[in-house]
Image: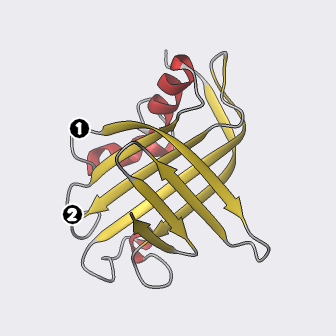
Amino acid sequence: MPTSWKIAGSYFEACNCEVACPCVFTSPPTGGECTVLIAWHIDQGSFGEIDLEGLNAVLAAYSPGHMLQVKWKVALYVDEQANQGQRDALTQIFSGQAGGHLAGLAPLTAKSWELRRHRSNIVQRENDAACVWATSPTQRLMGCLGRMAVM
C-alpha cells in the first residue's frame, strides 16, 4: 500500500510561452518548444509520519515540441534544507511515484529524471505576482511574472 501523503501551500509556474501557457490547455507552445519552471512551497504537509512543512520543490522541464507528443527532459530540485527522509519523500511526491496528479506526468517524461539538491525561495510581491528561484552547484533557475530565465 502506498504511503499516504498530503501537502498544502503555494504553487508557481513560469514558462517561455506568450501570456498564458497554451500547454496547460493541451495546445502547442507558442515558440515551438516549452521551458517551464514549476515550484511548490509547502506550508503544511506530511508523507506518512515525515513532516514536510516549510520545504520547497522545483521541477524544471523542457519539452522540444507539443507536450503531449514528445518526451520531456526534467530535473527535480529538492530543498537542501530537507533531511534524507524528507528528500526521499519530496522525490516520491514530485516525481509522481507516490501517486496523485503528478503521476499523470510520468508517461510524458523521459525515463530518467535528474535529481538535484537546491536552495530555493518563492517570493510573493505586492501585486500578487510571484518569483521563484532555485540554485544548484552548477545552475541557477529563476522564473518571475510568467517568464523564465536560466542563468
**Residue at the location (29% across, 39% down)?**
113
For this view, does 119 lie left or right of residue 92? right
- First in sequence: mark 2 or mark 1? 2
93 relative to 149, above or below: above
Q: Which residue is mark 1?
A: 112
**Residue at the location (64% across, 37% down)?**
55
Scheme of colours in the image: secondary structure
- Where residue 107 appears, x then y in whole percent? 28, 46
Dot 1 amino acid type: Ser
* Residue 29, picture quadrant: bottom left
- Where residue 91 appears, x then y in whole percent? 45, 31
Please tell me whether mark 2 or mark 1 is closer to you in this view.
1
**Residue at the location (65% across, 33% down)?**
6
For this view, does 100 lie left or right of residue 28? right
Viewer-proximal residue among 75 and 98: 75
Viewer-proximal residue among 28 and 55: 55
- Where residue 48 appears, x then y in whole percent? 62, 18
Secondary structure under badge 1?
loop
Q: Which class describes the residues within 10 Å of circle 1: few (<14), some (14-19), or many (20+)?
A: few
Q: Which mark is residue 69?
A: 2
Secondary structure under badge 2?
loop
Question: Going by the picture, which residue comes out furthest to the right?
Answer: 126
For this view, does 128 lie left or right of residue 34? right
